[in-house]
Amino acid sequence: MDRATRAAAVLQKLRATYPDAHCELDHQGAFQLLVATILSAQCTDVRVNMVTPALFKKYPDAKSLAAAQQTDVEDLIRSTGFFRNKAKNLIAAAKALVKKHGGEVPKDLETLTHLPGVGRKTANVVLGNAYGIEAGVVVDTHVARLSKRLGLTKQTDPIKIEKDLIKVVPQDAWTLWSHLLIWHGRRRCSARKPDCPDCELRVLCPSAGKA
């Protein structure tokens, strides 16, 4: 089975398994999703979702966040880890949004990745989930691990993994693909102890029983 055929079969099976798969970062609009995604680095979505309600209440838009004191932001996001650097990036990104983009989150990948603290992964999350723009594939630790186990890439660098995936995953499913693999990674194919015997992808996965 070639990679494109396997990817199509995986997509079909996971669609059926997780029909409600979606971004698990709580947000309303592109600005909140941008903030939440920056906070999610080296942190769980569950923890981010515990922090963002108070953060968004105090700083509901880019203008208010751009005027924030860093120590105030740090106090609100401390439990997400790396809070000093994250606070610095959040305020800097908000200032850039206000100064260069009228307070709105840009709708193209290149412009987004020029914002402080925003790389391809974050930009793809925002574009795909806030704007419905299929600009690329989000490659987090789950997507990287499962894509390799499924034989869809041999790469370890997220950028190279994404290049492999966009060759075999239909563009209209790029955003959904990431959600599906993330959901499967959290619920079935864990890093340390994947549940291969009960896995829905067992017959499609060249790594089944070998992890």
Image (cartoon, rainbow, N blue to C red):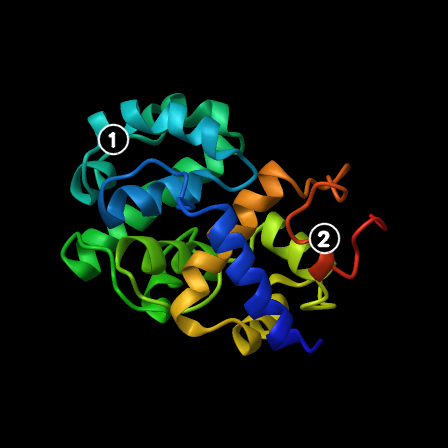
Q: How many marks are shown on the rendered structure?
A: 2
Residue 134, quarter of the rendered image: bottom left
In the structure shown, which secondary structural element does the residue marked by tag 1 occupy? Answer: helix
- Classify 117 as above or below 157: above
Give left or right: position of 110 versus 144.
left
Percent x, y for residue 89? 40, 45
Q: Residue at x 20, y 61 (%)?
A: 100
Q: Nearer the viewer, residue 196 or 164?
A: 196
Give left or right: position of 6 versus 202.
left
Q: Is the residue under label 2 in contact with that under label 1 (CB below 8 Å)? A: no
Mark 1–mark 2 Cα distance, whole angstroms, equals 42 Å
- Classify 82 as above or below 168: above
- Classify 161 as above or below 103: below
Q: Is residue 119 visible?
A: no
Q: Residue at x 39, y 44 (%)?
A: 20
What crowding class fits label 1: few (fewer than 14 Cα within 10 Å), some (14-19), or many (20 or more)?
A: some
Residue 125, quarter of the rendered image: bottom left
Q: Which residue is mark 1?
A: 56
Residue 202: give its label.
2
Q: Nearer the viewer, residue 91 or 33?
A: 33
Labels 1, 2: front one:
2
Type of the residue with mark 2: Arg
Q: Earlier in the sequence, mark 1 or mark 2?
A: 1
Q: Looking at the figure, which quarter contains the N terminus?
A: bottom right
Q: For the view shown, which residue lies furthest in the right direction?
A: 210
- Classify 30 as above or below 77: below
Give left or right: position of 35 versus 8.
left
